[in-house]
Amino acid sequence: MATYQEFIQQNEDRDGVRFSWNLWPSSRLEATRLVVPVSCLFTPLKERPDLPPVQYEPVLCSRANCKAVLNPLCQVDFRAKIWACNFCFQRNPFPPSYAGISEVNQPAELMPQFSTIEYIVQRGPTPPLIFLYVVDTCLEEEDLQALKESLQMSLSLLPPNALVGLITFGRMVQVHELSCEGIAKSYVFRGTKDLSSKQIQVGGDKGRPPQPENAGVFVFITRFLQPVHRVDMNLTDLLGELQRDPWPVPQGKRPLRSTGVALSVAVGLLEGTFPNTGARVMLFIGGPPTQGPGMVVGDELKTPIRSWHDIQKDNARHLKKATKYYEAMANRSAVNGHCIDIYACALDQTGLLEMKCLSNLTGGHIVMGDSFNTSLFKQTFQRVFSKDYNGDFRMAFGGVLEVKTSREVKVCGTIGPCVSLNAKGSCVSENEMGIGGTSQWKVCGINPSTTLALYFEVVNQHNAPVPQGGRGVIQFVTQYQHSNTQRRIRVTTIARNWADAQSQIQHIESSFDQEASAVLMARLGVFRAESEEGPDVLRWLDRQLIRLCQKFGQFNKDDPTSFKLSESLSLYPQFMFHLRRSPFLQVFNNSPDESSYYRHHFVRQDLTQSLIMIQPILYSYSFHGPPEPVLLDSSSILPDRILLMDTFFQLVIYHGETIAQWRKAGYQEMAEYENFKQLLLAPLDDAQEILQTRFPMPRYIDTEHGGSQARFLLSKVNPSQTHNNLYAWGQVLRGAPILTDDVSLQTTPLFHHKERRSDLTFPF
Amino acid sequence: MDDLYIKPGNQERGWNDPPQFSYGLQTARGPHRNLLNKRAAPGVGAPPPTPPSSNPLSPPPRGVTPPPLHPARPPLGCVATPPPPLGPMRSQRPADSSQSESEPDVERVVSVLNRALAACRQTVKDQVCSDVAKRLRLLEDSWRSGRLSLPVRRRMDTLSLALQSGQWDSADEIHRSLMVDHVTEVSQWMVGVKRLIAETRKLNPELLEPLQKPADPDQVPAEPDQVPVDPDQVHAGPDQVPVGPDQVPVDPDQVHAGPDQVPVGPDQVPVDPDQVHAGPDQVPAGPDQVPVGPDQVQD
């Protein structure tokens, strides 16, 4: 039998699924004692170059409240042409088109290798993709110029038949009419007053008699949303001629930015014309909204934008109102299946804290940069339009994810870029985790790396026998609009064995996926951090870790050094240690916008990327052998090494002291030190590989021992050596001492009983 | 795709701005060579293993000991990441050498485009045609007045060849690469070329005949693929690594870091003798010349 590691990897590659436990405890009580819930990370549209979609409709279970999809785990009677649903045990006749099936002639969806299968289904005519640019014109000249060029460039990356639209805003909001003929026209809205969807339609049709609904839609299409191939020349000129907002900005004031109304117009425009059609609203902002609904800060420069301190002191005047405004808009947009991206480039905060829900609820991107004239923004923006191995865009729209479970399991909720569709049913648990109370969620914007965390509950009663058949089954059904506008349905069906937690606890332990579990628990922590106080979240995480270690650790009473975890849990404590220090849970040193930004990316990336965010990767390059992963620990900072650290948001190349001196002396330019030159190049090469694929582009830091930017590395490593303990343990340590009073991984309360909390019965 | 290069990010506008990859590098993505996703497993609960240091308490040596000269085994022979076949640093402009030998001819490029436009006139609306014509004039003016950089001129040359031989996808791809890599220079007129590609693609083959016969037989260019790879490409090397500014302060690439800068230089005057030195593809780099690809200097 394959090892669990191979099994886990195979499941991720084939089905895009990573479960916390790969053997499931057979009763509710035993499941809660395992601390980490039965849960999984699921990547609905994981790229599968080897999986050609089939061109027919899925076969559904005929029971009205089941409708599970025929899958390889179903029992099939080939002679009677009947299949038994493995969720509700209903016996279903095959449709007539399946008359020819037999043991040797099976349809794809019955073959074991198609535990994940994708169907192309016909659902009437498919409208083209829609891209609506909403552009802030209160930018510096240089930024506006760079942004205009990026927008012009993007017209070349869009599919020719895509519809585009342009809204610009400053003090006023302008909706631009895109026609191929005549002079440029636009409709102007005041930026201070919100408009209903109806008003926007009427506003667009000013002076015309009311028209039947369809005619109205037509007017909108022809005026404001046009196929790229028809208007690209005019739109290029229009973009080229965009000017900075003409209203004067007095000294000591911020420019007036009507972001709220501009978005409202954009959402209303799409709502009125293309509900339930894949569309992207792309918002480009260079500062916070300063007037009208959704205003985040006033225009007086002397009043700074809210900080964490203001929020804690309940001193952020516009926070609640603005958040509520954008949440309502995000929900409206989600109902229509449209996603909203935010590209915020400014040195100060732009109000992402208030606006984050626009992207978080609709599956849109948030990109945060210093200026539109940076490689970070330009390339990240280009990558929004990147294509896959088939030449299709890596974006899909209007996703609906449905989860079906066998009787012993219920779904508690999801954490990811989605909204609930409030679909009650027998698979829905009363115990909510994340966005719960439903078995269906809408993910308006979805790409191959979009990953949801799903939490389950085992409902089998204690002492009840291990369920018949020995396996629990979960089916994920994802309906979406492909970027080539086809409607598709992807179905993934997985099963795991039940195990009796009393007699088989060691098997359950070895089925533990510590990487998935760390990310799943971290998502729960981040989800809590949105509504709870920081210290409470940390305490909750600590308690979970301690309980897990109590359950599975081996130790002699009162002897901390005897503590041991088996291999399947060995990395888990350090993941938690770094998570506690991460910007996802610590807001110190980050603005509210930055925290929102980091969390936005954390709750949507796949396992590998999420884990990099929790515990950055550190590789060491030296003359002593090939590059090797080293502990994210101050002891790894050595003079004759080059380190490459990847934190997801930053890439740091750090040259140790000796290496830096050699480099300064120019050895790399001497022919006889070719090997040194190669050593210097190796981490650059590897960094480049990461830079070429990461979305969003990370910041890139090339530094050395003693360099001011070395702080990016020093703040992340475990401070096993500090100025306090440099000479501890009787010998001088190798590595770099970190000037910090933080506790290190070796001295956290978990491993030292003196700091244990009184409400926990800690075993040491 | 030719033109694989990396240029530094805009450090003035964004702190630690990452390097910028050319369109060719972004799209021609080989398989992952080496995923850096491993972690070292610690022995938790105990201090990290600390091999005794050689002599940490003594003052650091005044001079630096040089790096090992002849290591027992090739130092990075077994690097986790062998250089990729597609790697940007080694595979500089694979099949573009033919064009680098001669200055792209504005007459020929413009004439191909104009003939393509003429072929479209029968089917495409007048207004669109005149709009395209306007943009082609803009292109010609920019070219003749020396406002187009060498890589743009070269790629336009390749684009016109692709258009002439009916390779629409390839022409379209070159148009995209120009929009991504050189948007400042080309955005105003490129959209006309883009429309031209889209319209000629739809035309009947017989309408395309005048386009496909070369205007002047003398100017038929050599097949790019037949030209052997220029040995100078080997020199393309290390300067293209994404280096931060604090690393190599005199890196010549950085002088041109700002993408808005219209390159001013010898390349613009076709008869200038300096042009011969435009890049390593043409003349082996002199000892004081930093071996950079021509694109970099331009960008």
Image (cartoon, coloured by chain):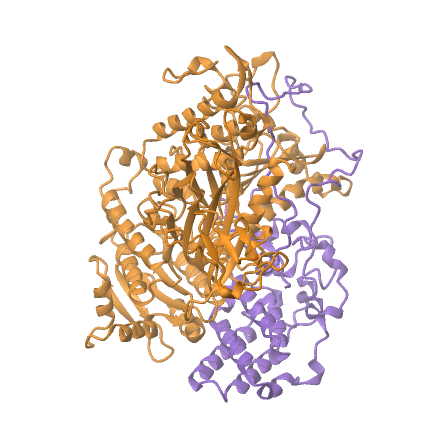
Q: Is residue A365 visible?
A: no
Picture quarter containing residue A513? Answer: top right
Near-viewer residue (A718 or B243):
A718
Near-viewer residue (A294 or A361):
A361
Picture quarter containing residue A598? Answer: top left
Which percent across, then down, holds residue A207?
19, 76
Which percent across, then down, holds residue A363?
40, 52
Near-viewer residue (A676 or A9):
A9
- Is A708 drawn above or below residue A388 in the view shown? above
- Is A624 drawn above or below residue A298 in the view shown? above
Point out the image quarter for the N terminus of chain B.
bottom right
The color chain B is rendered in: purple
Residue at 34% of width from left, 66% of height from top?
A: A274
Point out the image quarter for the C terminus of chain B.
bottom right
Which percent across, then down, holds residue A540?
38, 27
Q: Which chain is orange?
A: A
Q: Is residue A648 visible?
A: yes
Q: Residue furthest front?
A: A80
Near-viewer residue (A457 or A528):
A457
